[in-house]
Image: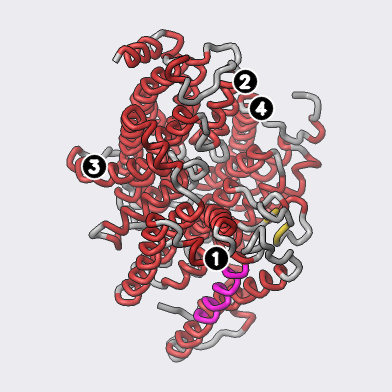
Amino acid sequence: MDAFMLGLQTVFQPMSFLAIAFGVFWGVIGGIIPGINASVAMALLLPFTWGMDPTTAVMMLAGVYCGGEYGGSIPAILIGTPGTTAAACTVMDGYALHKKGKTGLALGTSLIASTFGGMFSAIVLVLVAIPLAKVALSFGPAEYFGLALLGLTLVCSLGGKNVFKGLLAGAVGVFIATIGFDPFAGVPRYTFGSYDLGAGLEMIPVMMGLFAVSELFVQVTEVHAGDTVIKSVKGDTRFPTWKEIRGLIPTMGLGSTIGVIIGAMPGVGATTAAFIAYSETKRWSKDKDSFGQGNPKGVAAPESANNGATGGALVPLLSLGIPGSNSTAIMLGALVIHNINPGPLLFTQHPEIPYGLFTSLFVSNFLMFFMGLLAIRIAIKVTSISKPVLVASIMALVFTGAFAFNLNIFDIGVTLFFGVAGFVMKKYGVPHTAVVLGFVLGFIMEVNFRRALIISHGDNLHAIFNSPLSTVLVVIAVVSVIATTVQNFRKPVEVEAAC
Amino acid sequence: MFSAKDLSVGIVAIILGIVIITQSQGLVAKTSLDPAGPSALPLLMAWAMIVLGAIHIVGGIVAKRANKDAKPREGIGAILTSFLSRYRLVMLVALEGAAFIALLNFLGYLIALPLMTAAILWTLGNRNLKTLIGTNLALTAILFVLFHFALTVDFPLGPFTGLF
């Protein structure tokens, strides 16, 4: 209890509080800008933490982390462009809700779910930091492979009327993830002699192309001959009612739990958490058909999961000194430049840091709610801009964001290429979201399957069914694929328009 | 479940699968240290694409036969005219994007970006000179200040190199 009082005292010092507030503000802004995710926003602030007290520095970065994970959902809902990769899943139902005119419901659900997920993960972090780290670290390659496979089963239902289109798009996504230098053999794969392709395709340009640029092309086709203005969506800015929020609590609970657990696993991250939370919410929903067409649960699940992952990712960092994600690696960097090594000794040698961080997560999520409200009020005005201006502005923003990510013109080309590909896929009813899902999970699946094979000395069966947990995950994935395929044959789901 | 359009989807999927298989030929074989090898998963995906492509081709042919009476066949000229009239604007916007990429290093961000956005606005029917100039100047200024000064992104500046 004394330690928590120490945490509270640290957080409510004027400088610390201002640093957290600035961190959340910076994170929300970074999240809104395509190409700048939470870890990039944190990295940009890292040089400024040198002159700060280490506790204040880490608390400010935690604020950026929370704000960044939330901010990505605002452009995902308003313009169909995820500001961060973790918000990619939010596009499916968030943008569909906006197109139906229910903008306030989508933005409100995203804000409430993000705050819920963040608060939930902060509580879990306080209660189970050390035991959860042990569970997460018991995951071996076979379990990670099973988890990625389970996430990939979502591609079956993304195909809408045609389950095979979802599978085809998922296969293309997994293949795209393998382009570049092989992580094991170190040889270039499918680069066609291109130096730029050697490093593989980055997630941000691929996602911005498939989601944002393809949607811009769709908007362009909607310009009727002679019309100078594309018909804009008249959005209802009404936030969800208490009754609607109450109905979303189980979804947010499930999403947050998945977010915390997956966030605590090193190297998996908020994007995977969001996709798995969406997939599981849909799987257990009685109203599966409405997903992808503007179901608020399709916004609440990924948003609570990606913010739930923030607290989860801090678990291995604080308890074992292992960063679970890029963002926590930056926090580790901020501590190391102050000659502080995270790990179990941190709780005894510098208790103000972990307990200050615990408390700052609650404060960050509280501040995020109010800053989110403000950001929504400003961002919602985007819908009242004339569509040609909006198309040109988004194109400029997306291309600038794609370049800013790696300072590489090639990435803008990748964005344009996937924009055209996404547009063609939309015209042929191939779900581009399944490509993104395959791309996100393909790398995790391949690396862990090959690691599992090395451990099992090439025995395929032993590699996959190496533990009860991996067996359960793989069996659920296989049963799920069969069940979804059979279900789609009996009753095709119309989700193409939304995806 | 299938439509006549799926014939094209199937053909593209099979071509992509064959390209992946061909490109996998030169990759190193699996070893005892790496029992799967670098081409295992891509090859699995390639075969999946070929099988799924074949399913789409069969489905597409069946759907085409079922709809044979519903829609008379159009000549290649009519298809091309219809395609160009529907997607002319998309192709123009995509070309403007490609031109921006090609000219970015040479002209620099401060010239290439307003040129691209002006071209897009013009293509989409905006002929108001005030809107064109105002939007482009404001947009370029906001993005440049945000990314260059606040986020320290080094853009290629072309003739303005060394000014900022």
Q: Is residue B114 left or right of residue A379?
A: right
Q: Is residue A398 left or right of residue A493?
A: right
First to last magenta residue range: B43-56
Image coordinates for residue A462, horizontal then vertical, percent:
49, 63
Q: Are marks 2 and 1 on the same chain?
A: yes
Q: Quickly name the residue at label 1.
A: A459
Q: CA distance from mark 4 to mark 2?
A: 12 Å
| Mark with earlier residue (1, 3) | 3
Q: Quickly name the residue at label 3.
A: A249
Crowd around label 3: few <14 · some 14–19 · many ≥20 (10 Å): some
Q: Do labels 2 and 1 touch, CB within 8 Å?
A: no
Type of amino acid at the residue the image marks with label 3: Ile
**Residue located 76% across and 49% down the image:** B102
Crowd around label 4: few <14 · some 14–19 · many ≥20 (10 Å): few
Crowd around label 2: few <14 · some 14–19 · many ≥20 (10 Å): few
Query: Would you say residue A481 is visible in this rendering?
Result: yes
Q: CA distance from mark 2 to mark 3?
A: 39 Å
Q: Label 2 lies in what chain?
A: A
Query: Would you say residue A215 is visible in this rendering?
Result: no
- Say if the magenta span includes residue B49: yes
Q: Quadrant of the C terminus of chain B?
A: top right
Crowd around label 1: few <14 · some 14–19 · many ≥20 (10 Å): few
Q: Quickly name the residue at label 4.
A: B152
| Mark with earlier residue (2, 1) | 2
Q: CA distance from mark 1 to mark 4?
A: 50 Å
Q: Nearer the viewer, mark 1 or mark 4?
A: 1
Q: Do labels 2 and 3 touch, CB within 8 Å?
A: no
Q: Do labels 1 and 4 touch, CB within 8 Å?
A: no
**Residue located 47% across and 90% down the image:** B65
Q: Which mark is residue A450?
A: none
